[in-house]
Amino acid sequence: MTQIIITGISKGIGKAIFNKIPETFEVIGISRSLEVANESSKKNIIKCDLSNLIEVERLDFGFCQPDIDLIFINNAAIIEPIAMNGNISTHSIEEIYKINVIAPMILVQKLLKLTKPEKIKIINITSGVAKNPLQGWSMYSSTKAAIEIFFKTLVLEFPNIKLINFDPGVVDTEMQAKIRSKNIKEFPLVENFRDLKNKNILQNAKSVAVDIIKMIEK
């Protein structure tokens, strides 16, 4: 039996992965809400708000078994604030860094204390803006770059850990809807993203989930 821990299962790609993972795996979903469709006894949901670092620190990973393969899917992330620098509040900086960077770092520290590095595989859902930033996305871009470097450093320290940094491209999710709702002063390239939607060339979250599950099964 392989155990899978996935963050951010209430919507978007995370929800699609959680619902599609075969029942041959033992799945633990981490979500700030328990209102997630769950029709399998092998898919457990743990309530945790990743922006609350006290909750993250108290998260009980006692279900992890040292001799069982463990896959951690780092999916949860927020994109706000989308704004030009000079118009970003301290609170919004703190929130995005807590969820996108600090929380997954804490979760990895917990996993390393509970199981052997050679038993761990990490699938990090990243973004092209980790390497190619956009105006108005300084917070999201920098958090995605930071967590990528963290995981790459982790593998330097523990070469037996398997790591996949997976960029799903532009996917039709609630996050994309938030992006399209911005004005041009907040995000100068907003029309490009509206065009992607209007031309119906966004990827589907369910098809992305299928690709990720193939990585799980390898």
Image (cartoon, rainbow, N blue to C red):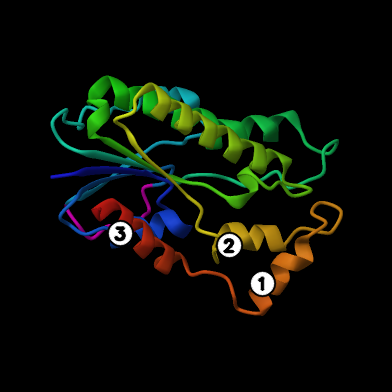
- Residue 200 makes an appearance in the image: yes
Q: Are marks 3 and 1 in contact (CB under 8 Å)?
A: no
Q: Are marks 2 and 1 in contact (CB under 8 Å)?
A: yes
Please report whichever mark, 2 or 3, sits nearer to the chain's N-terminal start.
2
Judged from the image, the secondary structure of the residue bearing numbered disc 1 is: helix
Q: Which residue is mark 3?
A: 214
For the residue carrying disc 2, how many other residues have a C-alpha within 10 Å: few (<14), some (14-19), or many (20+)?
some
**Which residue is located at x 69 percent, y 39 percent?**
139
Q: Mark 3 to mark 1: distance in Å?
A: 26 Å
Indicate the amino acid at tag 3: Lys
Q: Which residue is mark 1?
A: 196
Indicate the amino acid at tag 2: Val
User: In this orientation, which residue lies closer to the viewer: 129 or 173?
Assistant: 129
Percent position (x, y) of residue 53? 49, 25
Q: Is residue 177 above or below residue 97?
A: below
**Which residue is located at x 73 percent, y 29 percent?**
90
Find the magenta span and give its range. 34-41
User: Does 146 sit left or right of 60 as displayed?
Assistant: right
Quadrant in which residue 89 is drawn: top right
Indicate the amino acid at tag 1: Leu
Q: Which mark is residue 170?
A: 2
Judged from the image, the secondary structure of the residue bearing numbered disc 2 is: loop
Please report whichever mark, 2 or 1, sits nearer to the chain's N-terminal start.
2
Percent position (x, y) of residue 43? 23, 50
Quarter of the image where the N terminus is located = top left
Please report whichever mark, 3 or 1, sits nearer to the chain's N-terminal start.
1
